[in-house]
Amino acid sequence: MKAKDAMQGLTPLEEAQKIVLDSTPVLGLEKIPLLDTLGRVLGEDIIVERDNPPWDNSAMDGFAVRWDDIKREHPIDKPVTLTVIEDVPAGKMPMKTVGPGQAIRIMTGAPVPKGADTVLKVEDTEHTPDSVRVFKPELKGSNIRPQGEDVKKGERIIAKGTPVRPGEAGMLAILAKSFVFVHQRPRVAILSTGDELADLDERYSEEKIINSNSYGIAAAVQDAGGIPFLLGIAKDNPAALKEKISYGLTADILVLSGGVSMGDYDFTKAVFQDLGAAMNFWKLAIKPGQPLAFGKIQGKLAFGLPGNPVSSMVTFEQLVRPAMLKMGGHRSYGRPVVQALFQEKFSKRADRRHFLRGVLTNEGGVFRVWTTGDQGSGILTSMVKANCLIDVPMEVERLNPGDPISVQLLSEQGWDGHAVHVSGGPHRQSSC
Ligand SMILES: Nc1nc2c(c(=O)[nH]1)N[C@H]1C(S)=C(S)[C@@H](COP(=O)(O)OP(=O)(O)OC[C@H]3O[C@@H](n4cnc5c(N)ncnc54)[C@H](O)[C@@H]3O)O[C@H]1N2
Ligand code: MOO
């Protein structure tokens, strides 16, 4: 930690991230149906047990022929005429062998019959049920997809640790894997704290505010591939908090929001400590999201995120999400980062790393980024408008229009200059 940070008691985010990731286990494996594998991380190497395609097959609807019969240029009035001896639709094996002067009618995907070494496209011929007339030569081997051109028996085609995308899912199906081993999804128990909170379906009085953090965090958990469990709201007293936390310890991760700062009713730290957790109570050198607690309670990761709605989301993004990805078997834990040109003036003290909610556009390969407007940690519309977090380093005090800056991508919405629902400012886009 730098002397200046130590003086201020602020922990750099990178230090906190390292502590979190070092204490995060990778979850075990489970065998699941192929249809459920999207986004999951493979827990086994995928070895090819059968060539794909399993035999040479036709890439076109047409006629399987011997190249020797059709290799010469034929004048239009003297085409080669071959006898059609069989029809092979896809899904049937050919029964006959193509001999000199013969052809077999073949459909795309059907196995190439013995004797044939070339397939003619149907539109390059004239044909009757029993014969085919060929007017122009074709290169030897044309329109034949050889056995194993995609994958060969014995090959390791997908490595353990790979996240399943549509391509991988299709390949697993080609290999007839109806069930595969993947890493388990992290189960995340979510608890909001505070006497001022009322839940969505409760009748609430004027002094209450609605618990939004639980729902924003639950969506962030799902977005990171986890399973959220809502523990509801804990009142601001240690007994209530302890009871709710004990329910959450059946999950892999416990995420609390609220009660981590200096207020008279901020009990999270005391309760975490009471539960015997070796906890880190950080004042992180970031904005938003300064106060944060992290440690293990009965072997489970426990995070006490700050209660301000934006702060809880930004700290989730920087600390909980990477831990969840590691648990779920992923090998990289960060969001994609691009360099963009900042479009506004911005200034801050050189004491914290700021995560400004931003709108990124990509016009002809030039990335430009604007803030979403007011950046208060209670202004959740900043998250609604944002498609990225603008990562302003601790030491930077001033940004001017045109300055390059790193941007963490949260979603693809708005990149193309459309459908960004920002009202006003230079980044207003027409939505379609
Ligand atoms: N004296 C100090 N006060 C505060 C400090 C500080 O260093 N010294 N830090 C400020 C910062 S920065 C933050 S962030 C907050 C964090 O406070 P807590 O984690 O203790 O959160 P609460 O006080 O319980 O709530 C803060 C704010 O967020 C609203 N909130 C809380 N939970 C929810 C929820 N589930 N859904 C929606 N909104 C929620 C709450 O009503 C408050 O407005 O502390 C500062 N204070
Ligand atoms: O750190 Mo607080 O999260 O800035 O509002």
Image: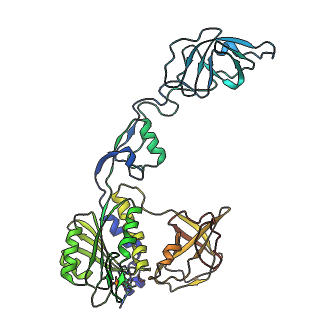
- When the figure is inspected, residue 361 is found, relative to residue 140, above or below; the finding is below
Q: Quadrant of the N terminus?
A: bottom left
Q: Quadrant of the C terminus?
A: bottom right
Q: Quadrant location of residue 343? A: bottom right
Please count the marks in the image.
0
* Image spot of residue 44 (x, y percent): 35, 44
Report the residue that reaches farthest toward the bottom: 264
Q: For ligand 1, which image quadrant applies?
A: bottom left
Q: Is 359 positioned to the left or the right of 244 in the image?
A: right
Q: Nearer the viewer, residue 298 or 81?
A: 81
Q: Quadrant location of residue 157? A: top left
Residue at 68% x, 62% y: name it: 364
Q: Nearer the viewer, residue 184 or 105?
A: 105
- When the figure is inspected, residue 262 is found, relative to residue 414, above or below; the finding is below
- When the figure is inspected, residue 207 is found, relative to residue 333, above or below; the finding is below
Q: Nearer the viewer, residue 73 or 423?
A: 423
Q: Tell me, yes or no, if residue 392 can be seen here.
A: no
* Image spot of residue 10 (x, y percent): 38, 82
Q: Nearer the viewer, residue 77 or 284?
A: 77
* Image spot of residue 141 (x, y percent): 62, 22
